[in-house]
Image (cartoon, helix red, strand yellow):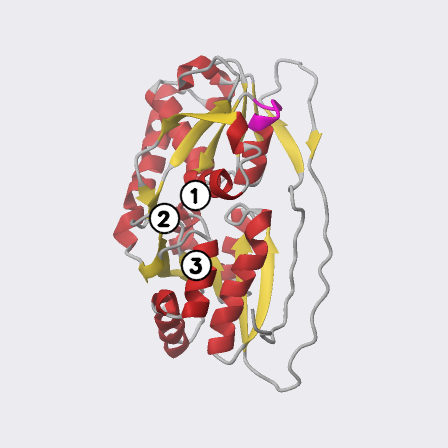
Amino acid sequence: MQNIPYLIKFITKSLLPGLLLLAGCERGEEVRAVDFRKTVVVSDPVTDAHERPILRAAVGAMISPKETHGIYLQLLAYVSNKMDMELDFTQRKTYAEVNEMLGQGEIDLAFICSGPYALGSEDHGFELLVAPVVQGAPVYYSYLIVNRDAPHQTLEDLRGTVFAFTDPKSNTGRLVPEYWLALLGERPETFFQDVIYTYSHDNSIQAVAQGLVDGAAVDNLIWDYFARENPVHTARTRIIKRSEPYGIPPIVVGADMPRERVDLIRGLLLDMHMDPEGAAILSELMIDRFVPADPAWYVSIQKLQETVWALGEHDTP
């Protein structure tokens, strides 16, 4: 690919983020900590000597498996180059960090999960820009996965086991399985023996594959990506439940970005699939094209949260 001048601040807290935090250990069991930390330092390339406006962009680690970091970087560099802007690229580990940066005007544009958009856009003031179309539709699913060799066939079979959530604010990685449990009159802290947070879907897939946890709920886009590109871990898991479709994780912009710039970036992304260079980048991410995003696509996630809260209050003694 041709050289594109941009400034990168590639902040990766870890490729396999953090210390897996164990919850629900009131029963006195020994806390089992699994450390996935591996740090990679990426040096800044030489930037253009000419002063240009800066496009500050972020991608949550749970949206982007480590294998696709470079491709997301190419996508954002494609946009910044077309806009004649420098790219200031930031990687963040949690959904909350990216939401806060958007709300505080520290970044202009971000790939975020559907849950943080549906449940946090009003608090943080960011707005929809575009959404990707994958396999013909702007939707995605939550997969409930277990180890290939495990006997579990249903969610009910996972009672008393160790389960992995991705992020506290994740739709597919936490909210959906909480909703499934709420329909059963259960809560994670009473249904499972232990719950851990992996802070990325690829970590959850790997944890199930290696038998570190008994089950996990993951984003189908991430599972399907690995199943196609690098199935070493997905081949050791089974999908035992799939959710209804939800509005796909969108690209959002901060409230302070000038309207003219917002419109230009939206236009570039909407036309990206018609440009050979842009189409090649999208293909690597398994994205067909970008389309205008509709806030109505994410209402079902808000209703999901309301249902979990309502059933949880009903079950509380």
Q: Amino acid at mark 2?
A: Ile
Q: Give the residues in magenta.
A: 208-213
Identify the secondary structure beneath mark 2.
loop
Front residue of 286 and 211: 286
Majority SS type along the magenta span: loop
Q: Residue 99: x, y in percent?
A: 50, 54
Q: Residue at x 47, y 41 (%)?
A: 228
Q: Quadrant of residue 273?
A: bottom left
Q: Is residue 147 above or below residue 121?
A: above
Give the residue number, with chain letter if any, for mark 3.
Answer: 282
Mark 3 packing: few (<14 Cα in 10 Å), some, or many (20+)? Answer: many
User: Given contact means CB atoms under 8 Å apart, are the residues at marks 1 and 2 in contact?
Assistant: yes
Q: Residue 198: x, y in percent?
A: 59, 35
Identify the secondary structure beneath mark 1.
helix
Q: Is residue 191 above or below residue 58?
A: above
Q: Quadrant of residue 47?
A: bottom right
Nearer the observer, disc 1 or disc 2?
Answer: 1
Which numbered dot is residue 221? 1
Q: Residue at x 47, y 64 (%)?
A: 109
Quick check: can you spot residue 139?
Answer: yes
User: Given contact means CB atoms under 8 Å apart, are the residues at marks 3 and 1 in contact?
Assistant: no
Question: Which image quarter is the C terminus in?
Answer: top left
